[in-house]
Image (spheres, helix red, strand yellow):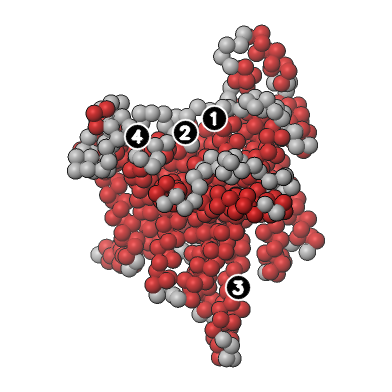
Amino acid sequence: MIRFLSHRLLSGLIVIVGVSVLIFLLARVIPGDPARLALGPEASNEQVEAMRQQMGFDRPLVEQYARFITGAVQFDFGRSLYTDQPVSSDIAAGFPATLELVLYSGLSMTILGVGLGIASAHYKDRWLDNAARLFSLLGVALPNFVWALLMMIVLAFWYQWLPLSGRLSEWLTPPPHVTGLYTVDALIAGQWGVALDALLHIILPAFALSLSGMAQISRLTRTNMVDSYDRPYVEFARAYGLSETSVAFKWALRPALIPTLMILGMQIVALLGNAFLVETIFMWPGLAKYGVNAIVRKDLNAVVGVVMVISFFFVLVNMIVDTVVSFIDPKIRLKSS
Amino acid sequence: MSQSSARWRGWRRFARNKLSVLGAVLIAIVFFCAIFAPYVAPYPEHAGVVVNFLDANQPPSAKYWLGTDTVGRDVLSRIIFGFRNSLMLGAVVIAISITIGTAIGMAAAYLGGKTELVLMRITDIFLAIPSLVLAMAILGLAKPSQLYAMIAMATVWWPWHARLVYGIVRSLKYEGFVVAAEVVGASPLRVMFSELLPNCAPNLFTKASLDMGFVILLGASLSFLGMGAPPPTPDLGTMVSEGAQYLPDIWWLSVMAGMGIFIVVLGFNLVADGLRDLFDIVG
């Protein structure tokens, strides 16, 4: 087990370092002259030259990278050219909002996706199964941002059941900061009204974000569970006189869940990526919205910071998923060590 | 004779799944519209810079089937020309990324050793950044244009093809026909091209069909965020984002363009399912 974990940790580390090199090169090579970019078209050549020296762009690339990575390890990505704040504090400010969104979205994706998959397999070829399969086709083929807009039109504009955008109604003040997740903080402070308001705000973006992953998870769960229903051990369990519910959950579902778990990491990362679209639509003041703005404004340090943080999360989530899977399925643990 | 009957059997196997046939029909329609766009579109000149304020913001009607946009251009015509862009983007991106991905995956799996280690680590690194984010970063730091969009998307897409080919070749490299070719003295390049590559084709073909939908979706997402082809190029993602500013009054602009994306992506997805049955690919 320890060998498996250390192996996993090492490869994760290599990937993170690789990502940092990739991002560093992207940010230095593509935009041409970052100093000119920072100062704008009106700056004189002397000013640009001074800026180049100040930002260290006149040094060799390797030295620049060394400086960048020493900073990055200490969570220091320099100043944002636009907000004039340290990028790390901008990221820290936006991160809880995105975390809250991805958390709710991930929960909705996993619970509803697996649930739908189970129901679909259990009622195979009946109407519920067909409806679920149609839904998962829609979830995969209809882009996230179109889903978001459709739900926005129907639920927020026409019926006005749910608020249109933002994290909280304008007339409310955010709960005292503990975790940064409004729904949790409000509960801690005992502000029930604020908690409910925050919850209502998060339903639409979180659900819209979760749909494509939900569709894929339910499809995968269904396929694998249908497959395990045909296996001899399920037949045996039935012959033994176990109830249908116990057969479904104890025998058919468990082996079917492993492939689902294995793609979960990938799906959570996809959530982080798609958050860039959903946060833009719902004006969710998170990390992804900040990232989009940074890219549009060509705010180099901010772009680098956001991409680094997101990739770090990717590697972390995948490591956790791999570890969990290896606990459940010893075959994987043995194969890779 | 025998070949044509094999083809017939193949078609029968594909057609057993009604949904794949629906997908094929959808794609045929989209391709037809894209190729003959100037003849199919009711107002072909609306694909460009046309201002027609008299008919601006019209809801769907007999004259404009899917309504008009904020400067009075026919939405249906723009969607039809948008198909053209999307298909071209998808085809180019997939062609580039299959070429790069196959070369890297094949070299890594067949040559093994240090080559394998280095190439697959590089692939992992590219996969560690969500594709939309990496494509956005590349494209945003360059400048938005169709060409850069293609480059950015190919950059994020090849790792998937590299992984696929890597997996197949690794499972095949000790098979009899490969070893036989090596024993007769075929060069590594020859073994890779004439023995291994044809065996990757069915998988790659199926993956390409599936990816066509997803690449088009990624392209639409990028242009939705304002990083696609600059105006007045008709682009489905750009149309959705333009329409989003005028919700809920001018709902048809976003919704119809969104449906356009949906039809293309759905079509390629369904066809990919059918191809998977046809070639008997698991997973």
How would you rate the neighbour count of disc 2 (Cα within 10 Å): few for under 14, some for 14-19, many for 20 or more?
some
Query: As rendered, which of A316 and A87 lies closer to the eye?
Result: A87
- Locate the C terminus of chain A by quadrant: bottom right
Residue at 61% over, 11% down: A43
Q: Chain of mark 4?
A: B
Whether residue B160 is visible: no
The residue indicated by pointer 2 is B226
In the rendered structure, which amino acid carries the disc numbered 2?
Gly
The residue indicated by pointer 3 is A255
What whole-number distance in Å separates the C-alpha atoms at marks 4 and 2?
A: 13 Å
Residue at 47% over, 29% down: B144
In the rendered structure, which amino acid carries the disc numbered 4?
Pro
- Locate the N terminus of chain A by quadrant: bottom right
In the rendered structure, which amino acid carries the disc numbered 1?
Val
Q: Secondary structure at mark 4?
A: loop
The quarter of the picture where residue B220 lies is: top left
How would you rate the neighbour count of disc 4 (Cα within 10 Å): few for under 14, some for 14-19, many for 20 or more?
many
The residue indicated by pointer 1 is A296
The answer to whether B141 is drawn above or below residue A15 in the figure is above
What whole-number distance in Å separates the C-alpha atoms at marks 3 and 1?
A: 46 Å
Which numbered circle lies on residue B37? Answer: none
| Badges 2 and 3, same chain | no
Please state the horizontal and vertical placement of residue B216, each as a whole percent of the image.
Answer: 42, 44
